[in-house]
Image (spheres, rainbow, N blue to C red):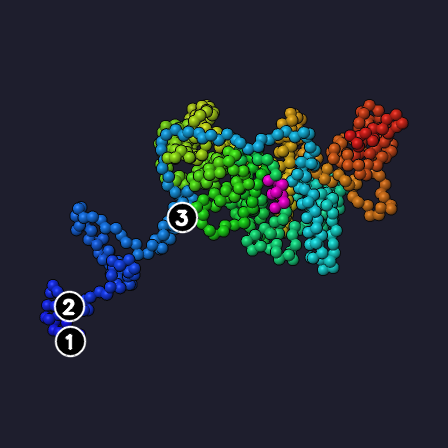
Amino acid sequence: MQKNKCYSVQDALKIIMGDDSEFEGCDDSSDEDPDDPLYNPTKQDMESDESSQCYDSDNSELSTSDDVQQPNVDLHPQNRSNLGKKQETEGTVQGRKHLSWRSKPFETPECTFKGPHITPPDTLLSPLEYFRKFITTEMLELLKEQTNLYSVQKSEKHNNVNTTVKELEIMIGLYLRMGLCQLTGNRAYWENDTRCPMIADVMSRNRFQNLLVNLHFTDNTDVSSRQAKDKCWKIRPWLDMFRKQCLDITPEEHNSIDEQMVSFRGTHSPIRQYVKGKPHPWGFKIWSRCSSSGILYDFTVYEGGSGKKSSLGMGGDVVVKLCETLPSDRNYKVFADNLFSSAPLVLNLLQRKIYFVGTLRGNRLAGCQLEDEKSLAKTGRGSVDARVEKEERLAIVKWYDNKSVTLISSYCAVEPQDTVRRWSKADKKFLEVRRPHIVREYNTFVGGVDLLDGCIARCKYHMRSRRWYLYLFWHTIMLGLVNAWLIYRRDCKLLGVKNTLRQKSFQAEVATSLILTQARRGRPSLSEASPSPPPPPKRVRVGVPDDVRSDQVAHWPLKCEKRGRCKLCKVHATTTLCEKCDVRLCFTEERNCFKTYHLA
């Protein structure tokens, strides 16, 4: 055909319907050949292809079963890969990844503990020495420097509080004594009607309040310490040093992970949380890893969500972070409740040979189909339903007692079962109920953090303040004290010591040692040239701690009017009294109990 020539409608139809078409407008160029591997379809071609595919899918019922299904051509492989990754991520969040499960017995893997075992010490340390394992002199040096610096920075006349490490130890000792004798406020210990001599005679009220006002842990003018993502930067140096001391403890085989709440009802805090149902719903949340006996090994302060989705969820990320300080391939066992547990978390820990046991929520079963609670209730108390993962890496057990509970584990399941006593309201008697092995393991080792919380709440004094980070400071003081007492009890058990100190007695001895060791008894005098007269003699009741007795500082002999029995020999009577120890000791030509008592 010739170009620029007019054709009628009949001529055009005849040309188009003809076998040999010479109409140049219908020819495709070689550059747009669909069979060419370098062919790039245009936007119109893509739209026409999509419309044809939609039409074919809508009329798919017209095709016969003998038709061969054509492969779909993916015109956007990059978008499809991104979509697949997004779907995969969403499918694994919070344990929603589906696994293959089988109804068969679970074979317990070889999980013998290969970590270091706890060895008994050579000698039993004093309570103060146990306490100084966690609240060290380096930590108090940091506190002294920053407190003095902060007092100069905040004062208009640049007055320095001029505190020392010993004075900070005395302040901590007074705080521990306040926990043993709790009053409504700090000032009540110095008021006439409610005066407490064991506190008011050691330090004046104004000095104590001045130290509390100036307590500080970091330099406010140092811009490098103010990290944008760290909301606890005001107390971060102290927390890091305390955490380092906790990590030095040799961990036991069984560890439990849970949350702690530090009560705080103030409004000026960037990390305050509200947890419904807790004894103290308002406060700071601390994720902790403890032994089954309550010894704290590791912790982290929760500063709020990051806004990023994770395949393990928030609870799973906490467990992984706290377990990073556990050695791999040592077969440690970790226990947690349903806030943290999920199937991906168990598989993640299993890669490092860390085995896990925990309760499981119903929306994190990872495709495991178990009997419902009604069917288990018909069978009766003690009924069990269990499933094992296809590769036998973990098992899920559902046990019915008063209610059903679901647990997940990577090293134990149903067998071997034992029996427990349960009260039956209908029969009004105790019944023997069969209990799976996984439930027994969970109940035995999961309560470490709760035990730690109970010990802290027993003798903790709630020091009120407007500065939120001081609540974390006093909480670490109590954590160090309880950790010291629990390790003291463990050492006593290893050494076979039966008469161990109770927590209140241990706290009282630590407080007395902090106040009197390397210090003079009573308040400091205003003038060293004119010392105050010695106090009147008192009736000897109890001795001072060994740390105070052997510190060789300010043990002055005094003569009292009344004779009393010697503290050391307990045979002869004497009028010689040690001013600091407040005990009578012989000091004659024949014997020198005064010297022997302070050097023993």
Read off the residue under disc 3: 89
Read off the residue under disc 1: 5
Left or right: where does residue 108 sit relative to residue 248?
left
Q: Secondary structure at mark 1?
A: loop
Left or right: where does residue 492 sit relative to residue 306?
right
Picture quadrant where residue 411 is located: top left
C-alpha gap between disc 2 and disc 3: 56 Å
Name the residue rendered at 70%, 43% in the picture: 137
Q: Is residue 316 magenta?
A: no
Nearer-N-terminus badge (2/1)? 1
Q: Give 527 or 223, whichever is nearer the viewer.
A: 223
Picture coordinates of residue 584, whole percent (x, y) = 82, 30
Read off the residue under disc 2: 22
Residue numbers of the magenta segment: 239-247
C-alpha gap between disc 1 and disc 3: 63 Å
Picture coordinates of residue 334, whole percent (x, y) = 50, 36
* Viewer-side label of 1, 3: 1
Q: Give 183 or 120, whichever is nearer the viewer.
A: 120
Which amino acid type corresponds to the residue marked 1 in the rendered image?
A: Lys
Which amino acid type corresponds to the residue marked 2 in the rendered image?
A: Glu
Which amino acid type corresponds to the residue marked 3 in the rendered image?
A: Thr
Q: Is residue 246 magenta?
A: yes
Q: Residues within 10 Å of mark 1 (few under 14, many from 20)?
A: few
